[in-house]
Image (spheres, rainbow, N blue to C red):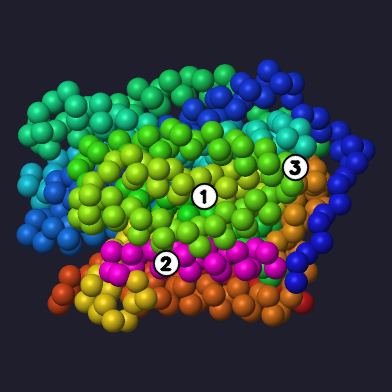
Amino acid sequence: MAQAPLPAHTAAASDHQPSDTRTIWKVIAASSVGTMIEWYDFYIFGSLATILAGTFFPQGNTTLALVQTLATFAAGFAARPFGALFFGRIGDLVGRKYAFLVTLLIMGGATFIIGLLPGYATIGVAAPIILLLLRLVQGLALGGEYGGAATYVAEHVPDNRRGFYTAFIQTTATLGLLVSLLVILAVRSVMPAEDWERWGWRVPFLLSSVLVLVSLFIRMRLRESPLFTQMKAAGKTSTRPIAESFGSAGRWQTMLIVLWGAAAGQAVIWYTGQFYALTWLENVGKVSFVDTRTIIAVALVLATPFFIVFGALSDRIGRKKVMMAGNLLGAIFIIPIFQLMWRFTPAGGTYNAVALTACVFVLVIFVTIVYGPIAAFLVESFPARVRYTSVSLPYHVGNGYFGGFLPVIATVVVAFATARPEGFPVAAQYAGLLYPVAVAIITFILGTLLLRETKDVRIDDETHAAVDTTVRPAVLGLLIALTLAALFLADRYLLSTFTPEGEPPYVQYGFRGLLLVVALAVVVPRLGKRGRA
């Protein structure tokens, strides 16, 4: 049953006032440039996955090397929720600005080191191990970046234009991917193919250091969020942001509703429309390296302004309506669009780059619909004293796990479909799309039923909650069951593919151990409270 919209609050609820227009644009520019650079650092890895597979992993089985590279890429996503907790806590305790200055330096340093790292042929198994560790560091840094940037911008702008202004932060992920593609194409075009394969691919990683220094200079000149400054002066900041964010069943219910009702669907549509489309065109459609990245880059340039359009639209008609429309459109049209794309690839028919660009453009439009309003929705869903921590976790679980693992999950599903085509409703080359479609449908249903509209809440209201915090056992039970089912499927069908035949399943053991730690962290404090009661 849908929740009633939250009432608008009067100005008397708080002394907080938005910044002047000049300050707002300065804040947006500084925050966006830094966040875009972090996304550039993060996604350049995925854009060069095929080359990295041949450099850092043992050769002999090309498919296994690619899966291992994609798994290393996904490991960065797996680390993002932990970065969200760590840096979110710093952001709620110390300040928004300090936290995302630190994340920028960490991300830039890790990317620069990847550009210098010797390959498997030089240092053997140490190469993939170090690469994995650097990827985890990148994930930790990015986990603390987005929540800080979105919160920082949102706490400067007027309540009635929050969707419009925060949508500029939403463009940064796509722009980071776009810049990574443009840098790769530029470097690739100025050197012979042999030099590119041998050492030229390292240049985009090394260039990151220049971009990071420029962004750091810009961000150092920013002041702390005015709302956070007021709260700190009044002694209203949280002393235990993690405990406040996750210390009760009601708060876990809130997190799971935001995760399943908004973040998960947004994540799979984002990664399908941009990242999976790239790998699919190159590996399945057999489009050339340069043409694939040109097609994606042109589509991104054309579609990026629509993040702002749909962010602004959410100020008028609501975040929920826009996001749910995007999930529904994605669920209905993703597979038909890829079927159309197949006809215009070298592998499927007559190659037509213009038609492929048009198809990818439509996919990215779906991305802009679900992603444009979500920053405003997230910051409106949690009170200011724990906003950095609370915003970061569901966003990064959604994007880190549901989105970040999408290329690996899709590759595994395609392998299953190729081996057992009679068990799938679509041809093998589209089987990987069943995963994002299923998640988008789940998000559309749960979001429609459980999410409240948030566009009228005040950014500084400490009493509001965009998701009802009253524990409803049926709802909480359903969300827990969905979460457990997702974890079981990941353990049973996904993680097992990371283990070479005949080797112990160390990845699965590590995953189960991590789940046990998380479960104990949730259960033990609650048992302690009951014992003291």
Q: Which residues are magenta?
A: 427-449
Q: Position of residue 291 (x, y in %)?
A: 25, 39
Residue under the image location 49 percent in, 27 percent down: 33
Q: Are marks 1 and 3 in contact (CB under 8 Å)?
A: no
Residue marked by disc 1: 366
Residue under the image location 21 percent in, 41 percent down: 289
> What is the C-alpha distance between the residues marked 1 and 2?
16 Å
Residue 41 in sight in this render = no
Q: Is residue 117 left or right of residue 531?
A: left
Residue under the image location 62 percent in, 77 percent down: 478
The quadrant of the picture occupied by the C terminus is: bottom right
> What is the C-alpha distance between the residues marked 2 and 3?
32 Å
Residue marked by disc 3: 316
Residue marked by disc 2: 435
Residue type, label 2: Tyr
Instruction: Using a 10 Å C-alpha cutoff, classify the residue at mark 2 as few (fewer than 14 neighbours), some (14 to 19) or many (20 or more).
Output: some
Residue type, label 1: Phe
